[in-house]
Image (tube, coloured by chain):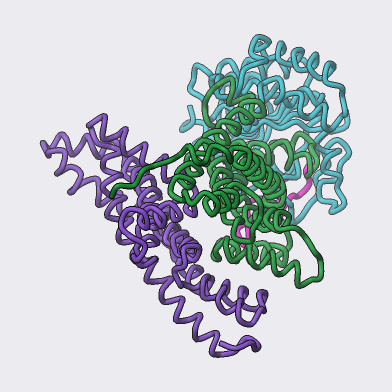
Chain colours: A purple, B cyan, C green
Amino acid sequence: MTTSAFSIVHFEFLCWAALWTIGLSAIALVGGSLLGFVIALARISSNKSLRWASSLYIQLVQGTPLLVLLFLLYYGIAVFVGPTIPSIVAAGAGLTIYASGFLAEIWRGCIEAVPKSQWEAAECLALRRSQRMVHVILPQALRIATPPTVGFVVQVVKNTSLASVIGFIELAQAGKLINNSIFEPFTVFVVVAAIYFGICFPLSAWSRTLERTLNVADR
Amino acid sequence: MSPIVKLTDVHKYFGTYKVLEGVTFEVPRGGVAAIIGQSGSGKSTALRCINALEAIQGGTIDVCGHAIQDPELNRRALRCDVGMVFQSYNLFPHLTVEQNIMLAPTCVKLMRKPQARDLAHQVLAQVGLAEKAEHYPEQLSGGQQQRVAIARSLAMKPKLMLFDEVTSALDPQLTGEVLKVMEELARGGMTMILVTHEMAFARKVASQVIYMHKGTVWETGSGTMLDSPRTAELRSFVNNGL
Amino acid sequence: MSYRFDFLALLPYWREFLWGVLLTLQISATATVSGFIIGTICAIARADGSPFIKRLVATYVEVIRNTPLLVQVFIAYFGIATLGVHVSANVAASIALTVNVGAYTCEIVRAGLQSIHRSQMEAAECLALSRTQIYWHVVIRPAIERVYPSLTSQYVLLMLASSITSQISAAELTAAANRIQSVTFRSFETYIAVGFIYLVLSFVVRAAFALFGQTVFTRRRKLGTAL
């Protein structure tokens, strides 16, 4: 890229980078969901040490900045595994941990939001704990959990921008690269922001619609 | 004696639905008027119109010299003269009983805190709750909360008190303690208009009973009117109600 | 696999860590206070303003909530410079965080305002209180008391997110860490240490909010129940 005004070439580069933003979000969400679900279950488990450990994990993830977590993984992997590991590994791992810590807490809340009478009713039908969970509680919790989960997807998409600090080329990093060559920071970052908005706003709107339908259905 | 409240041919619509269709009555100073009627008869709406909580589309209402239908009505001056108590108490949950009562005198009448506190204790004593000043509403029973609501209105020294089904949310036991307070107020000469389902109370305390039906004053008279209704509607209402 | 941890190498830099902590707290506190004021005003405007104002506030909230803070920080930093005004990175950082947290505060306080029942305002109206008095005594105060836990979480997140401003070289804790690791080459230890400091800070900030809440909301202190 040569020094010039912001052009269609730059925009193309940004769009390509946006695909990496989406890809990284997908990795974080899949990994974060699997890990987060296990931790949410551990959080409400009858085993005290499991509850304690999962609670500690959530406190750790929610009590430290994602940025520091990413640095930590980036340098940690470099130290223990070797410096040639691509940055997507650290970025993917960091965002997975981040997403799991928050999703676990969101989902725990949703599971606990299922009325106690439902647990009791299931117990009276002589279902085992796992059966109660699978057949009675989780289907109901899923309904409650959908709007906040979709809302959290927005947070994940936005926070993939932090992967730029460890050199992963996604939307924000692409913006920085373009800016380094043409130095039109305002234009570049407004366009970058607009692309993020284009990804996030529909999700936010969808989350709100889901919430509204849920509230209506509850009435 | 000149009336303190005078409604003349009051009309009120919610959209196209007519709630009040030419309501006319007056209440003299020191009078106690009980408005009775089925739900949907417009009795609560009439009361709310008197305090300018609802706009009217026709007729005139005069309350303590305030013309309610006037678009230039000074609502705050009106509310200094009129106290109102609601079915759902509507105490402010984040304030103590005392603070609930002191709020309006300090904000509106710019009374100093110590005076306002004295006043609060005085009105609380009047409703028999002097020892509850430091409590929060949620720590009180429904009947106690309603008595605090009455005290809160009294602290503004109103010339007229409006009671909108104030005992409807209470069980019979608690209803009694609220009615007792209201009866004492009436005996003290307070002008009162109450919308109520308590027929016995209306018969005993009211100087004037107003039976509303289909948005109009169907029948009106003294408390004894309930013993010998003239219209079939009031007769069936009284028989079903008792 | 034979990495030897050496946290002692960081010890000489304790002053820089401490300085970073103070600056992080300063930036976060500035953004919290000003963001709270802006957010509350926006929430009221959105509930009770003219249609144009409502739209304007809604747009502000949506734009901020659907774009990354990192990009907002860049735009604030370079945008202010484009206007020809020279501000330090820390000022730009405080401005960006204020604008950001203002939008989140607006949404939280709005939910609080919506939770206040109309009958409360009606009762206050019947006591001859003016519009402003009603808003202040009967609407805003209980609304904020009600959403105070959500606000606390949001402001803890803000404190953690202020680390992002290290990317415009605002001087705060993460920036201090970046510098220290580049001097000591003890990156892993540095970020473990700094992560731990943030963890402690988030507890401290949470505790400070709890304490403040106890002082301001007497009802909560006395009854221990949520409004």
Instruction: Say above or below: A5 vs B241.
Output: below
Q: Position of residue C105 (x, y in %)?
A: 62, 50
Q: Nearer the viewer, residue A82 or B141?
A: A82
The residue positioned 67% from the left and 62% from the top of the image is: C57
Q: Left of A76 or right of it: where is B59?
A: right
Q: Left of A105 or right of it: where is B23?
A: right
Q: Nearer the viewer, residue B128 or C137?
A: C137
Instruction: Say above or below: C207 vs B187.
Output: below
Q: Left of C137 or right of it: where is C194?
A: left
Q: Is residue B46 visible?
A: no
Instruction: Say above or below: C209 vs C195.
Output: above
Q: Nearer the viewer, residue A10 or C190?
A: C190
Q: Is residue A173 visible?
A: yes
Magenta: main secondary structure equals: strand
Q: Position of residue A122 (x, y in %)?
A: 18, 39
Q: Left of C13 or right of it: where is B62?
A: right
Instruction: Say above or below: A75 vs C14.
Output: below
Q: Nearer the viewer, residue B202 or A37?
A: A37
Q: Is residue B57 magenta?
A: no
The residue positioned 62% from the left and 74% from the top of the image is: A190
Give the total of numbered labels.
Answer: 0
Quarter residue C132 falls in? top right
Q: Position of residue B4 (x, y in %)?
A: 83, 33
| Bounds of the magenta segment | B7-23
The residue positioned 55% from the left and 43% from the top of the image is: C156
